[in-house]
């Protein structure tokens, strides 16, 4: 038999009709995956570039903040656009505006459509060489202590010194050194204040707005410090703030009286009025300025950095401008009373029973203590008063604790005062992105 007899003719295999469909599906899946990878790589690159821009903006923002803190505020009272490193990628906008006792700095860094901004409250560190627990002007009479009084920190005292006395059958029960710190001689007048800040506050209190405002039924108003201030003018009419939240870059003016109820919430707001009353149980953070008086109810709580200040501009007037913190209130910040010219009714800061103040208390006139008052920080006054059982004692400190060491080391003060260093710090971060 020949070899060809056993040769079998092979036929190509037949493919099912569904195979083509499977190939098409697989091809689509592969194409989709490839497209997804290409798109992912594209967006990854976009995000990477965006992240690089944001990192650059963050560095520029921090450099701008350092520049504001390291320079005099007045340089930036008019907004300035600065190139940090003299190239087109490092421009920042810098601005500083007065805000009550402090300044608000605003820094904006931008590139293309990306922008970072940050607003912050600026204040000064304390000068440890001049900082003290107590400064009482020398009125040619000694300072007297009785009961469980404690004075911890340096003290500027009259030349006549500080003496232990009996008051209503009670003797002095504190440390025999009386002052737990160094004693220094005070002057007949208090340390001077910075006129630039005083002038700004007096102008704000004396301003007469041409328009009248309302909240138009709103129960929550907020304004960023990166935006222009929103001002509300209540002309010659009394205003009661209740069941409302006010936050941020807001300023309230009144030629008359403003009453702040405990149901109102104020956060970093400025208030200027003839007189101000704060209801019992109020809790908030604000700076209140008045020409005549600021009176709080009981159990109020003011968060740091708050301010209560009265500025009596009525030269030679006999009316007494006063601040009164009622029983069991807690205050964190600065209490400040000032008059241009000493009057018969000197300015008065009245610290009620069981009140705790953390910060500075400055009165161009008098400070009056009630039972068990406590100040963690500094007291500066021409004269001290103490009321016990309806009896008034002049230049007496009775059952009062004044302790500068209990004040936080992070406490910052206003440019209004002289006992500050040249170091400016961020007091509070306000808003930004």
Image: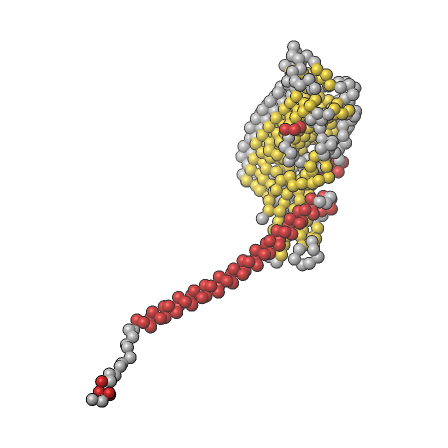
Q: How was this image coloured?
A: secondary structure
Horizontally, residue 304 falls left or right of residue 208, namely left
Please report the residue visible at 61 percent of the width from the left and 34 percent of the height from the top: 304
| Residue 27 rendering spot, x and y as whole percentages | 39, 69
| Residue 433 rendering spot, x and y as whole percentages | 58, 48
| Residue 177 rendering spot, x and y as whole percentages | 70, 19
The answer to whether residue 273 shows anywhere in this view is no
User: Quarter-wise, where is residue 314 in the image?
Assistant: top right
Please report the residue visible at 32 percent of the width from the left and 71 percent of the height from the top: 19
Please report the residue visible at 73 percent of the width from the left and 18 percent of the height from the top: 162
Tell me: residue 13, above or below residue 49.
Answer: below
> In the image as oriented, which residue stretches furthest toward the left?
1
User: Quarter-wise, where is residue 241 in the image?
Assistant: top right
Q: Could you say which is closer to the camera, residue 127 or residue 433?
A: 127
The answer to whether residue 150 shows anywhere in this view is yes
| Residue 258 rendering spot, x and y as whole percentages | 62, 32
User: Quarter-wise, where is residue 431 in the image?
Assistant: top right
Q: Could you say which is closer to the camera, residue 130 or residue 295?
A: 130
Quadrant in which the N terminus is drawn: bottom left
Horizontally, residue 366 falls left or right of residue 21, namely right
């Amino acid at each position: 038999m020949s070899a060809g007899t056993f040769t079998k003719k092979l036929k190509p295999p037949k493919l099912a009709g569904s195979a083509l469909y499977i190939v098409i599906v697989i091809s689509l899946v592969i194409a989709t995956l490839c497209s997804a990878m290409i798109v992912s790589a594209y967006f990854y690159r976009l995000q990477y570039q965006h992240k690089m821009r944001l990192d650059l903006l963050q560095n520029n923002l921090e450099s701008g903040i350092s520049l504001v803190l390291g320079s005099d505020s007045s340089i930036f009272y008019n907004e300035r656009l600065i190139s940090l490193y003299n190239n087109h990628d490092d421009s920042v906008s810098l601005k500083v505006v007065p805000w009550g006792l402090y300044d608000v700095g605003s820094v904006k860094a931008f590139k293309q459509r990306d922008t970072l901004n940050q607003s912050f409250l600026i204040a000064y560190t304390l000068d440890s060489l001049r900082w003290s627990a107590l400064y009482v002007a020398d009125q040619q009479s000694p300072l007297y202590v009785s009961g469980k009084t404690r004075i911890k920190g340096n003290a500027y005292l009259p030349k006549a010194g500080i003496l232990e006395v009996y008051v209503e059958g009670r003797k002095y029960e504190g440390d025999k050194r009386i002052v737990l710190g160094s004693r220094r001689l005070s002057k007949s007048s208090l340390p001077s204040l910075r006129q630039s800040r005083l002038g700004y506050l007096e102008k704000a209190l004396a301003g007469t707005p041409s328009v009248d405002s309302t909240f138009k039924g709103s129960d929550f108003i907020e304004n960023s410090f990166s935006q222009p201030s929103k001002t509300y003018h209540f002309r010659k009419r009394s205003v009661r703030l209740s069941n409302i939240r006010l936050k941020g870059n807001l300023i309230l003016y009144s030629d008359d009286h403003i009453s702040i109820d405990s149901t109102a919430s104020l956060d970093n707001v400025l208030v200027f009025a003839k007189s101000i009353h704060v209801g019992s149980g109020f809790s908030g953070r604000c700076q209140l300025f008045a020409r005549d008086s600021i009176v709080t109810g009981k159990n109020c709580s003011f968060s740091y950095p708050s301010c209560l200040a009265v500025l009596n501009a009525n030269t030679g007037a006999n009316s007494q401008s006063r601040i009164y913190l009622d029983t069991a209130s807690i205050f964190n910040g600065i209490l400040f009373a000032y008059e241009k010219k000493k009057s018969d009714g000197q300015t008065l800061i009245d610290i009620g029973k069981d009140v705790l103040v953390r910060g500075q208390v400055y009165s161009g006139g008098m400070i009056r203590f009630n039972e068990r008052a406590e100040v963690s920080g500094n007291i500066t006054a021409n004269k001290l008063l103490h009321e016990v059982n309806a009896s008034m004692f002049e230049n007496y400190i009775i059952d009062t604790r004044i302790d500068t060491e209990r004040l936080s080391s992070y406490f910052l003060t206003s440019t209004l005062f002289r006992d500050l260093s040249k170091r400016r710090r961020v007091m509070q971060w306000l808003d930004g992105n």
